[in-house]
Amino acid sequence: MKSKYEEAFEKFNASQSQEEIQKDIEKIIERDFTSCNKLEVLKTLYSCIDLTTLTAKDRKSTVVPFVEGVNERAIQYKDCLPPVAAICVYPAFVHLVKETLKVPSVHIAAVSGGFPASQTLLDVKAVETALTIREGADEIDIVLNVGAFLDGDYEAVVEELHELRSEAKDVLLKVILETGALESPELIQKASILSLFSGADFIKTSTGKEYPGASLVAAYVMAKVLRQYYEAYGERKGLKISGGVSSPEDAVKYYCVVKSILGEEWMTPQLFRIGTSSLEGKLRKAILDQR
């Protein structure tokens, strides 16, 4: 007898092989890159940035100027540059972001749930998530329990995600799959499916910490799942690319792949994000150079 999880997986088309996906990606980029590599797309990509600082050296004297930079750019470039989508920090700095941020459209995101390894007690993850929201976060990025997932303990994975979804209440919840640890398209697909059925608003590639970050293959697989989920249930869920997207050219390639699968309607901050610390300045320069 099939488990309910196997039945859920079978609602989606079987994953393509790595080689098939790579060939599709190459075709998409060859076909679309030139038409996508233009000013309006660069502005869209900028508006989808989750501007991130997640280091051991983060402190008041670095986080406050980090946020003030967002405030200053919103004034300085108001006629030619959209604000970023969100600022993403550790829970301890959410209150500083809330006190300092002056741009109403920019969300306050925080990692939670034992980030980046997710290797702590569920009660700790739940309390951390609740406290982080109380501090002022309106978006939460948590990490899938990769160890339980790789062991095939889908019950534990789903139970944990449901608990954290409950703690997050109406706050936007992004589930990080850590695709660099999952490696195969089939596992990335399964992790995406479990996360969506467990209440994720977004599925996200990577923490950008221990394992390889985002890849075009992972983005392709996740976008395919999001498309099929929408076609089956009529609900659009978001995709966040994070870890290693460091140049405008890289960002445009992700844009090409995601747009080709999900369509133009997905290419907004409500449904597409790029988590980065280094890309913002490079994208800004590329946009300003084209004015």
Image (cartoon, rainbow, N blue to C red):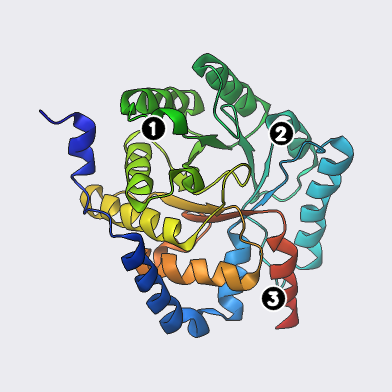
Image quarter where the C terminus lies is bottom right
On screen, 210 above or below 15? above
Q: Are marks 2 and 3 in contact (CB under 8 Å)?
A: no
Q: Which residue is more in the foreground, 145 or 265?
A: 145
Q: Residue at x 57, y 22 (%)?
A: 130
Q: Which residue is mark 1?
A: 149
Front of the two marks 2 and 1:
1
Q: Which residue is more in the foreground, 64 or 136?
A: 64
Q: Is residue 258 left or right of residue 231?
A: right
Amino acid at dot 2:
Val
Report if residue 78 is visible in the image.
Answer: no
Amino acid at dot 1:
Phe
Report the Cα–Cα distance between label 2 and label 1.
30 Å
Q: Which quarter of the figure has residue 82? A: bottom right
Q: Which residue is mark 3?
A: 287
Q: Which residue is mark 2?
A: 94
Front of the two marks 1 and 3:
1
